[in-house]
């Protein structure tokens, strides 16, 4: 039973008949379950049980501008709102979502509540991509929650001026929106706040609220266009399911990402390769390029046995080669190892190593043919 507004503006509320916050509790349960997945599937060396770390969040669907815009992984718009950067982040958003449900779900119903959550989440994600720096990783339901509160703020004007319902919706919404849209608590618990997502979510939710308010007949208890709300909610659910499937498909390669040398750490030129090859190999032993740098250095020092060992180690990282590098890197390894084997008098072994490259036309194939290592 919804609040009944008497002629004098008072509310007659039968608390024991108020419907449960079905959508609210369902969404809280969903983000708690996803956080459990963050703990279970946390990437080794990335964060702790209470702080998953950037690598884990990216692997599980965080909003990363380069992966979304350049990599085409738009499904992250649906997964990122369900992820959280730690227990404090999760607790605050769960509490805010509960307050939003108390203010809005019993007014618009669970279907429209879920639909507004989806619209706010997408609005927040798009604003984050449009405004934030490219290196910012964004997660959390904050944008969606801001959308719920902004919608509640607008829909409150459906009720009489002196009604308790209107006062509660206005005070509750403003009490959350004002501090959430200005940088008062940035850096709280060591985490930065994505204000772009907050603003985008609030604008999206406010638009939905204003649209509903304009279409909602004063004598009708339920908001209009239920089928539209169902379609939006189903879109959000399907998007989340598809995002989960993509996380499963890409998780194995993302778990390996921690072993890749960051672009900013790559050596520039032969002098730096020789100076840093041992250091990079010790820090990034799974990156084939670490072994390549070390092989080149050892070969320059006439340590052919050590160079062969490192060329073979680079080639052995097949999973890394497939996940992060183009086939040309494997070809480079094979060419250099084949030439080294030929130089040591092991021609048959060298020819076998060269054969996969001989099948491709190009400079490396010509080099191997001139060395007599490509069988005709």
Image (cartoon, rainbow, N blue to C red):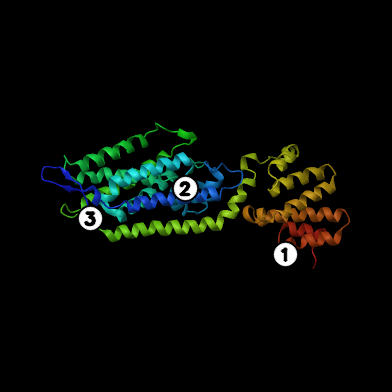
Q: Residue furthest right?
A: 345
State how far apart marks 2 and 3 are (Cα): 32 Å
Q: Are marks 2 and 3 in contact (CB under 8 Å)?
A: no
Disc 1 element:
loop
Question: Is residue 111 visible in this depiction of the protein?
Answer: yes
Quadrant of res 235: bottom left
> Residue 246: x, y in percent?
51, 57
What is the count of numbered marks?
3
> Residue 199: x, y in percent?
36, 41
> Residue 298: x, y in percent?
81, 43
| Mark 3 closeness class: few <14, some 14–19, many ≥20 residues within 10 Å | some
Q: Which mark is residue 222?
A: 3
Give the labeled residue for mark 1: 359
Q: Are marks 1 and 2 in contact (CB under 8 Å)?
A: no
| Left or right: residue 300 compared with residue 330 | right
Sequence order check, earlier mark of 3 and 1: 3
Q: Residue at x 11, y 42 (%)?
A: 8
Sequence order check, earlier mark of 2 and 3: 2
Q: Residue furthest top?
A: 184
> Residue 96: x, y in percent?
36, 42
| Left or right: residue 106 compared with residue 316 | left
Q: Residue at x 47, y 56 (%)?
A: 243
Quadrant of res 265: top right
Q: Residue furthest left?
A: 7
Q: Nearer the viewer, mark 3 or mark 1?
A: 3
Give the labeled residue for mark 2: 83
């Amino acid at each position: 039973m919804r609040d009944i507004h008497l002629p004098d503006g008072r509310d007659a509320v039968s608390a024991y008949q108020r419907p449960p916050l079905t959508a609210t509790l369902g969404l809280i349960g969903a983000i708690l379950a996803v956080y459990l997945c963050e703990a279970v599937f946390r990437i080794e060396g990335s964060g702790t049980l209470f702080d998953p770390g950037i690598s884990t969040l990216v692997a599980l669907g965080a909003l990363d501008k380069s992966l979304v815009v350049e990599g085409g992984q738009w499904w992250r718009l649906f997964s990122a709102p369900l992820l959280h950067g730690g227990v404090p982040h999760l607790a605050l958003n769960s509490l805010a979502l509960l307050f939003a449900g108390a203010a809005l779900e019993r007014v618009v119903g669970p279907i429209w509540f879920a639909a507004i959550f989806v619209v706010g989440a997408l609005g927040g994600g798009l604003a984050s991509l449009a405004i934030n720096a490219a290196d910012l990783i964004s997660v959390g339901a904050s944008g969606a929650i801001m959308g719920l509160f902004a919608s509640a703020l607008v829909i409150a004007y459906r009720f009489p001026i002196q009604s308790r319902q209107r006062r509660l919706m206005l005070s509750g919404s403003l009490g959350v929106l004002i501090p959430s849209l200005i940088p008062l608590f940035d850096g709280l618990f060591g985490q930065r706040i994505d204000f772009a997502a907050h603003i985008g979510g609030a604008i999206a939710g406010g638009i939905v609220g204003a649209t509903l308010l304009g279409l909602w007949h004063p004598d009708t208890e339920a908001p209009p266009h239920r089928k539209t709300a169902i379609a939006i909610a189903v879109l959000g659910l399907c998007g989340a399911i598809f995002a989960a499937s993509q996380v499963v498909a890409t998780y194995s390669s993302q778990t390996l990402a921690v072993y890749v040398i960051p672009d900013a750490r790559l050596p520039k030129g032969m002098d730096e390769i020789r100076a840093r090859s041992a250091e990079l190999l010790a820090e990034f032993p799974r990156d084939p390029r670490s072994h390549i740098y070390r092989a080149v250095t050892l070969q320059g020092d006439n340590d052919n046995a050590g160079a062969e060992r490192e060329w073979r180690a680079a080639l052995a990282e097949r999973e890394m080669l497939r996940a992060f590098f183009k086939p040309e890197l494997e070809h480079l390894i094979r060419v250099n190892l084949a030439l080294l084997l030929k130089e040591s008098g092991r021609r048959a072994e060298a020819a076998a190593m060269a054969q996969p490259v001989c099948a491709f036309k190009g400079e490396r194939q010509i080099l191997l043919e001139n060395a007599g290592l490509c069988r005709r």
